[in-house]
Amino acid sequence: MEKSTKGLWHEMEAMLHTRFVAAREESKPVGQCWFILEGKKIFEERDQVTVDAANNKKCYPCVFSHGWFEGFCERWSVAR
């Protein structure tokens, strides 16, 4: 269940939480790397990724840091 405090990327996080619940129901291993990869996939699916022309790298609107992950787990009541 979602807590009242929303993160900056609430819509992406809601989709990510839905995917997390589905993965757990299928008994798939889910760790911090999984959340980051799935979060990036969501941005890519929604065409919210830009490419830095200087180095040809994808730029995501969210920085998937350890701090973001901790906040996500707290906001969405995900036990680590």
Image (cartoon, helix red, strand yellow):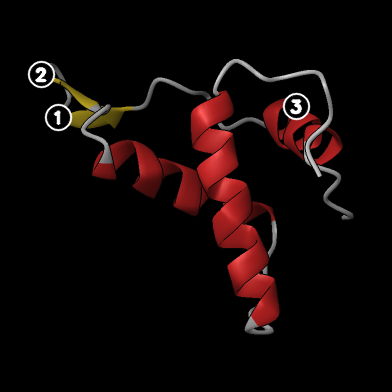
From the viewer's perspective, is 19 left or right of 55? right
- Residues at marks 3 and 1, CA–CA distance in whole angstroms: 26 Å
Please give the label number shown on residue 67.
Answer: 3
Q: Which badge, 2 or 3, comes first in the chain's sequence?
A: 2
Q: Identify the secondary structure beneath mark 1.
A: loop
* Residue drawn at point x = 78 percent, y = 29 percent: 71
Badge 1: how crowded within 10 Å, few (<14), some, or many (20+)? Answer: few
**Quarter-of-image position of residue 58:** top left
Choose mark 2 or mark 3, whichever is in front. 3
Please give the label number shown on residue 53.
Answer: 2
Of 52 and 30, which appears nearest the observer?
Answer: 30
Residue 29 in view here: no
From the viewer's perspective, is 36 left or right of 47? right
From the image, tell me which residue sits under label 1: 56
25 versus 42 height, above or below: below
Residue 43's x, y, as percent?
35, 36
Residue type at mark 3 is Gly
Is the C-beta separation of discs 2 and 1 under 8 Å?
Answer: yes
* Residue drawn at point x = 58 percent, y = 36 percent: 13
* Residue drawn at point x = 67 percent, y = 20 percent: 7
